Each structure stands twice: as C-alpha cells, then as structure tokens.
Image (cartoon, rainbow, N blue to C red):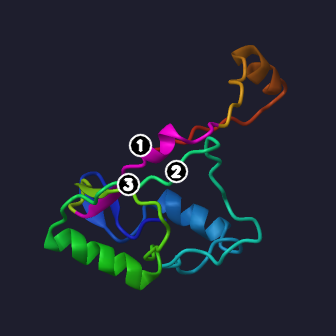
Amino acid sequence: LATDVENEGEKTSEPPENIKELLKEFQDILPDDLPNKLPPYRTHQHGIVEVPGSKPTFRTPYRLGLTELADIKKQIAKGLIRPSTLPYGAPILFTPKPDGSLRMCINYRALNKQTIKNKYPIPQIDDLLDQLLGATVFSKLDMQ
C-alpha cells in the first residue's frame, strides 16, 4: 500500500474510508509496515534460457547525473539492488514519475534478442467466458 494517497487532487498520508475498512477487515493477513528491501532468496531461482552458443551481452552504461547516482546508492543501501560481477551488463536510465521521484529503467534489448522466449497460447475468449459460468461476484482491478 502506498504511503501517500491522492484523493480528489489532494495528497495525504491518510487513506480514504473505503481503504481503511479493507485494511481493518484484512488486518490479520496484511503487514503493519511494508518492507524496505527485497524478500530473502527462495529455494527456486529464476533463470533466463539463452540461444545455444550465444555470448554474454554487455552494453556501455549511459551517463548518469548526480541525482540518479544518489538514487542508485539509496537503492543499494536499502538492499533493493546490488552490484554485480557477472559478464552481463545492461544500461540503465531514469524517467521521472508523476510525483517527481525517479523510476529506474533497464535496457535489456540486447539480452532479449538472444533469449529463448516462453510460448504460452493465448486463451480463447469463449473458454474464458465458460469459466465464469455460475459466478456471482465479479471485480475489476485498475492498474494505472
């Protein structure tokens, strides 16, 4: 959950009443405070499968300003990112978020070119609608 809520154009740290009700209803499963670092390593580590015979990709980093370098140091200090000694490298850049903070973007296009893509069929709309047969509650999640 976000620490700042925008309600009718005003930013506040206080969530709206409907959100407060949800938080109260599910307080037994929601954490009191959000973590400021990544969760511990899992037993299964994610891997990227590359085309056989491909070599590690490394691209020259983009130039970064002092604000961007400070943001990287802050993320390292929080444990959200860490330095790597792998032979792979992808340049990063920052874009401004609506609130003025920075969003880190990583350019993985070179690595993506030599990655074997997972192929999953897109479900047919008729099959999806059949799965809803008999359902009485529908919801919509708006991710903006």
Q: Residue at x 58, y 67 (%)?
A: 23
Q: Nearer the viewer, residue 135 or 87?
A: 87
Residue placed furthest toward the top: 126
Range covered by the magenta-colored residues: 101-117
Q: Nearer the viewer, residue 93 or 22?
A: 93
Q: Nearer the viewer, residue 58 or 1?
A: 58
Mark identifier at residue 109 = 1
**Separation (CA) of disc 2 from disc 1:** 14 Å
Q: Residue at x 80, y 31 (%)?
A: 135
Circle 1: is it few (<14), some (14-19), or many (20+) Cα within 10 Å?
Answer: few
Q: Amino acid type of disc 2?
A: Lys
Up-down relation of residue 126 to residue 110 (above or below): above
Among numbered discs 3 and 2, the one appearing first in the sequence:
2
Q: Residue at x 40, y 70 (%)?
A: 3
Up-down relation of residue 127 to residue 84 (above or below): above
Element at badge 1?
helix
- Queried whether the magenta region covers residue 113, the answer comes back as yes
Residue position marked by numbered label 2 in the rendering: 55
Residue position marked by numbered label 3 in the rendering: 106
Q: Amino acid type of disc 1?
A: Arg
- Queried whether the magenta region covers residue 92, the answer comes back as no
**Separation (CA) of disc 3 from disc 2:** 19 Å
Element at badge 2?
loop
> Measured from the top left, where is residue 55 in percent x and y?
52, 50
Circle 3: is it few (<14), some (14-19), or many (20+) Cα within 10 Å?
Answer: few
In this image, 67 relative to 93: left or right? left
In this image, 116 relative to 123: left or right? left
